[in-house]
């Protein structure tokens, strides 16, 4: 009997490149149809290439959607049934979110791929690191936070020039300021909204910081998008955050999802966090990309929260 080899690039996505890169690590990749199963020591990450819900979009035809899911072990699944704990752990996310699906939890990331797009040089390392890192940085950070062993060590490879490059792009689109190892921008969500400093309440706050090491991974670039919506009911806030993480995994016309929704600095607002480890600094312009994605994500989340009863 002859077995047909899997398509190396299903729907135009070069899964074979990921498989080859992972084969050089201690992980064990194995293809089955349009899905790549990557075996860790205790978990399996599933990288699936699936059809979009709607192929046509404002950004051009969608060729495929890549989902990256690492189901949590059953014993851990039972420990994080508390939505507040999930949000707390997600505040230390790197490139994936603890996401709930019918009572089960997984670490999830998603990438929508457009036909005219030529961004594999940025997308590939994000996907690869999401697979390799899996859940370890998130759980390692959580252990340190909960045990009080946190030491903010690690020098970032991102510097002032990197942040000034981001400012060059964002300043054309928003109020933006870079200084030292940080950058802050405001994205207006309503017509005429420019800056909270001018009394506007409908702006999302975007910050990237090269002086905020990850508790487990050390140096890198911490990225934080804070929405202005304040939800006083803690239970509703946690439900909204969980819903946003689920919505991010949908096969729709959405910006790349490499991060997590969690509680913001106000304590009662939703926020989206990502952490780019130093190894990703070599990908030129990646901080610009995540910043542009943050602007679009802010508008998307603003619209989604209306559907969730938040205004």
Image: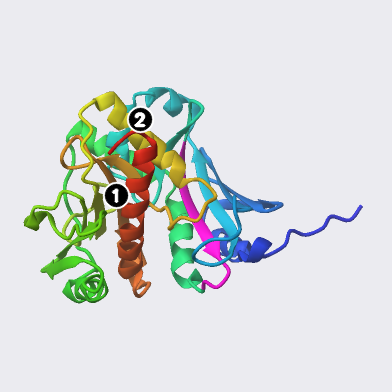
Residue 140 percent location from the top left of the image: 32, 41
Q: CA distance from mark 1 to mark 2?
A: 17 Å
Indicate whether 252 appears above or below 170.
above
Magenta stretch bounds: 106-117
Mark found first going from the N terminus, 1 or 2: 2
Look at the numbered disc 1 and give the secondary structure of its residue: strand
Of 271 and 277, which appears nearest the observer? 271
Of 186 and 21, which appears nearest the observer? 186
Q: Which residue is at the far right? A: 1
* Point 67% across, 61% down: residue: 10
- Report the label total: 2
Look at the numbered disc 2 and give the secondary structure of its residue: helix
Indicate whether 101 appears above or below 136.
above
Q: Is residue 17 left or right of residue 186?
A: right
Residue 116 part of the magenta-drawn span: yes
Indicate whether 264 appears above or below 113.
above
Q: Is residue 24 left or right of residue 4?
A: left
Q: Quadrant of residue 13?
A: bottom right
Residue 238 percent location from the top left of the image: 31, 30
* Point 18% across, 38% down: residue: 149
Q: Which mark is residue 273?
A: 1
Residue 245 percent location from the top left of the image: 40, 41
Q: Is residue 74 visible?
A: yes
Residue marked by disc 2:
239
* Point 30% across, 54% down: residue: 275
Q: Which residue is at the far front? A: 191
* Point 28% across, 44% down: residue: 92
Disc 2 residue crowd, few under 14, some 14–19, many 20+, Cα 10 Å: some
Residue 250 percent location from the top left of the image: 51, 46
Q: Quadrant of residue 261?
A: top left
Q: Is residue 21 left or right of residue 154?
A: right
Quadrant occupied by the C terminus: top left
């Amino acid at each position: 009997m002859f077995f047909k080899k899997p398509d190396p690039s299903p729907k135009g996505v070069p899964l074979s490149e990921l498989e080859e890169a992972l084969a050089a690590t201690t992980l064990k990749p194995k293809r089955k149809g349009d899905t790549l199963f990557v075996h860790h020591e205790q978990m399996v990450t599933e990288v699936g290439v699936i059809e979009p819900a709607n192929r046509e979009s404002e950004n051009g035809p969608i060729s495929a959607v890549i989902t990256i899911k690492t189901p949590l072990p059953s014993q851990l699944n039972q420990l994080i049934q508390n939505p507040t704990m999930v949000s707390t752990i997600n505040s230390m996310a790197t490139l994936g979110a603890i996401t709930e699906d019918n009572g089960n939890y997984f670490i999830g990331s998603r990438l929508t791929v457009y036909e005219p797009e030529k961004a594999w040089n940025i997308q590939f390392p994000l996907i690869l690191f999401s697979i390799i890192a899996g859940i370890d940085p998130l759980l390692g950070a959580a252990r340190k936070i909960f045990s009080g062993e946190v030491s903010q060590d690690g020098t970032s490879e991102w510097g002032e020039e990197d942040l000034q490059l981001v400012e060059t792009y964002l300043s054309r689109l928003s109020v933006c300021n870079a200084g030292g190892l940080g950058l802050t921008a405001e994205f207006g969500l309503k017509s005429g909204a420019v800056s909270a400093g001018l009394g506007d309440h409908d702006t999302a706050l975007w910050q990237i910081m090269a002086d905020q090491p990850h508790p487990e991974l050390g140096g890198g670039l911490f990225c934080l998008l804070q929405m202005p919506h304040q939800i006083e009911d803690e239970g509703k806030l946690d439900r909204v955050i969980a819903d946003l993480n689920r919505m991010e995994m949908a096969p729709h016309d959405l910006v790349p999802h490499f991060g997590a929704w969690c509680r913001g600095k106000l304590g009662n607002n939703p926020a989206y966090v990502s952490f780019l480890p130093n190894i990703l600094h070599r990908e030129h312009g990646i901080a610009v990309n995540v910043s542009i994605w943050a602007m679009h994500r802010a508008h998307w989340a603003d619209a989604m929260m209306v559907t969730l009863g938040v205004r």
